[in-house]
Every structure is written in C-alpha cells, then in structure tokens.
C-alpha cells in the first residue's frame, strides 16, 4: 500500500515519468468502469513487449501498478523503471 497520497495527475507530470513516456512507443490516459478493480484514473505505458498500467482507485485513492507481458517475455523492465521513478518521490504503489 502506498503511504503517500499523491494525485495521479501530479505523478503524470513528474520529470522522471515524462522521460519514461518519451521513450515509450505508446502512452495513454484511461479510466476504469465503476464497480471494477480498475475504477479510477490510469496512466498506460507501452514499450516493446510490455504494458504497464498505473492507476489510482477513484474512491480509496490508492495507487496500484500492474504489468502485462507478451507470453514469451519474462523481464519487467518498463515496470521496474516506472517503480524506480515513483520511489524517488517516496510513492510505493500496490503490486501483485
């Protein structure tokens, strides 16, 4: 659980996050449907065979990060890069 409550819109503007976005092949902002675990605001990072979803639950404001890899991939390089950027700001999102 993250101890520091920070709005995902603030995170989006961190220089470290912007640098990661600039290296990605795809980036987006999405929103999860009410009633689902993804209900809230998201930042999506797409790089090579990896998709990282950083999201903030609308009601609880907790941050969570998930990583999706191509079936034959094992390394979560982008995932770790995003986690490292957040850690610099003392933000520790929930993970698996």
Image (cartoon, helix red, strand yellow):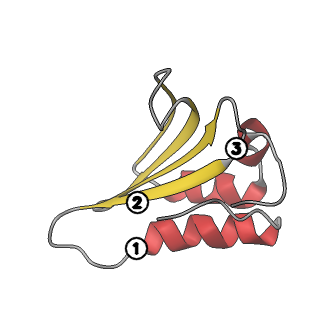
**On screen, 64 above or below 80?**
above
Q: Position of residue 69 (x, y in %)?
A: 28, 63
Q: Quarter of the image holding residue 13?
A: top right
Q: Residue at x 65, y 49 (%)?
A: 63
Among the two numbered marks 3 and 1 on one chain, the one whose residue lies closer to the N terminus: 3
CB contact under 8 Å: marks 1 and 2:
yes
Among the two numbered marks 1 and 2 on one chain, the one whose residue lies closer to the N terminus: 2
Mark 2 packing: few (<14 Cα in 10 Å), some, or many (20+)? some
Q: Residue at x 47, y 24 (%)?
A: 35
Residue that carries the numbered disc 2 in the rendered image: 67
Q: Residue at x 74, y 47 (%)?
A: 11
82, 1: nearer the viewer: 1
Q: Position of residue 55 (x, y in %)?
A: 58, 43
SS at badge 3: helix
Mark 1 packing: few (<14 Cα in 10 Å), some, or many (20+)? some
Residue 73 lies left or right of residue 39; in this view the side is left
Residue 89 lies left or right of residue 27; in this view the side is right
- As drawn, the residue found furthest toward the bottom would be 75
61, 73: nearer the viewer: 61
SS at badge 1: loop
Label 1 to label 2: alpha-carbon separation: 7 Å
Q: Viewer-nearest of labels 2 and 3?
A: 2
Q: Which mark is residue 76?
A: 1
**On screen, 6 above or below 4?**
above
Q: Residue at x 73, y 60 (%)?
A: 2
């Amino acid at each position: 659980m993250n101890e520091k409550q920070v709005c995902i819109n603030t995170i989006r503007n961190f220089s470290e996050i912007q640098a990661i976005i600039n290296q990605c092949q795809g980036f987006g902002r999405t929103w999860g449907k009410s009633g689902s675990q993804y209900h809230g605001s998201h930042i999506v990072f797409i790089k090579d065979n990896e998709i990282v979803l950083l999201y903030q639950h609308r009601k609880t404001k907790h941050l969570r990060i998930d990583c999706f890899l191509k079936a034959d991939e094992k390394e979560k390089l982008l995932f770790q890069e995003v986690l490292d950027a957040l850690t610099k700001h003392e933000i520790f999102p929930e993970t698996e």
